[in-house]
Image (cartoon, rainbow, N blue to C red):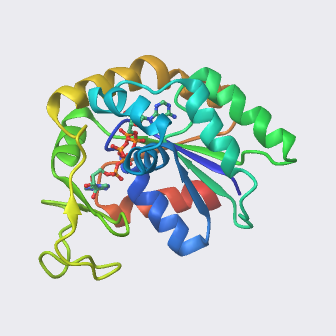
């Protein structure tokens, strides 16, 4: 089953994608994670996109479509989770064509609906393990042992994203409403859209996603 998780910044796409990987063996393809990895490894592309990402603007379609195209031959028997991609109509068209060229298709597009006040709270409290990328939150999801990652056991290596500040978040939200939200209508018209309430705790939201995928 190939699915898209779509929603504004902080909707919980990455959090829920990690669960689907652990529970169903699906493969997460997050363009945000790929771009951050390119930055860290100092590639030419990583240098090009760093300032764009820090401002909260969208990276060019050409770059992100190229990143996804490189991954579609990965072994993913249980399917792909597209997290943060597509974000524009051009990316959605490209994804459809890429999947078709591999003899694959999309089974569901899950829209996670969360209001702006909750998004600001989630984004400004977020931190992740620098080793394995597991996500945490100052208020909603603290590690069981302070300073130690629940998943990989790394100590003291937590980090915060440079674009998780109020200015960049405002730009990211505007990019979502302007460029990405038209995809809701696009996938609705194709009969692939499933809408879920993204408010509530992480378990509750996971249950709603499972219901949307299996129901
Ligand atoms: P990207 O990394 O995709 O960021 P985003 O879409 O802004 O999404 P986030 O990762 O911020 O949020 P999320 O929905 O995954 O929430 P999370 O699960 O972490 O993109 C970053 C940048 O890269 C873009 O701005 C752009 O520049 C570029 N880019 C990426 N893809 C691109 C593309 N396709 N085209 C062009 N440019 C692209 O949760 C957030 C916090 O809330 C966490 O702390 C978590 O613990 C907590 N939380 C999660 N669920 C709940 C819950 N139910 N209750 C309480 N807390 C919760």
Q: In which quarter of the view is residue 120 placed?
A: top left
Ligand 1, by image quadrant, is: top left
**Relative to 109, is 154 above or below?**
below
Residue placed most toward the observer, 94 or 208? 94
Q: Is residue 16 left or right of residue 53?
A: right
Q: Position of residue 83 (x, y in %)?
A: 51, 47
Q: Is residue 168 above or below residue 102?
A: above
| Label total for image | 0
Residue 133 at least partly seen: yes
Pick out the residue farthest to the top.
178
Q: Residue at x 61, y 71 (%)?
A: 25
Vertical relation: 33 (above or below) 96: below
Residue 204, image x, y percentages: 37, 62
Locate residue 152, reporting x and y percent.
Answer: 34, 80
At 57% across and 31% down in the image, what residue appears? 63
Task: Name the residue: 15% across, 31% down.
Answer: 166
> Residue 7 at x, y = what percent?
43, 38
Q: Residue at x 49, y 48 (%)?
A: 34
Frontmost residue, 205 versus 132:
132
Q: Is residue 81 left or right of residue 49?
A: right
* Quarter placement of the N terminus: bottom right
Is 161 situated above or below 19? above
Q: Nearer the viewer, residue 46 or 33?
A: 46
Left/right placement of residue 188 relative to residue 54 reads right
- The answer, for residue 190, to whether it is visible in the render is no
Give the position of the C terminus as an image quadrant: bottom right
Q: Nearer the viewer, residue 179 or 70?
A: 70
């Amino acid at each position: 089953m190939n699915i898209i998780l779509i929603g504004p910044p902080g909707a919980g796409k990455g959090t829920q994608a990690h669960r689907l990987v652990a529970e169903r063996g699906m493969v997460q393809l997050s363009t945000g994670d790929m771009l951050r990895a390119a930055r860290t490894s100092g590639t030419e592309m990583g240098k090009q996109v760093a300032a764009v990402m820090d401002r909260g603007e969208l990276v060019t379609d050409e770059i992100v479509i190229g990143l996804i195209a490189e991954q579609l031959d990965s072994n993913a028997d249980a399917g792909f989770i597209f997290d943060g991609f597509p974000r524009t109509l051009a990316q959605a068209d490209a994804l459809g064509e890429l999947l078709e060229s591999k003899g694959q298709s999309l089974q569901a597009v899950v829209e996670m609906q969360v209001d702006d006040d909750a998004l600001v709270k989630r984004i400004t409290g977020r931190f992740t393990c620098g080793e394995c990328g597991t996500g945490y939150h100052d208020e909603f999801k603290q590690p069981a042992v302070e300073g130690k990652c629940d998943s990989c056991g790394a100590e003291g290596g937590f980090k915060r994203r440079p674009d998780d500040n109020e200015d960049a978040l405002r730009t990211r939200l505007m990019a979502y409403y302007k460029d990405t939200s038209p995809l809701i209508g696009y996938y609705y018209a194709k009969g692939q859209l499933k809408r879920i309430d993204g408010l509530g705790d992480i378990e509750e939201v996971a249950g709603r996603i499972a219901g949307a995928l299996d129901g």
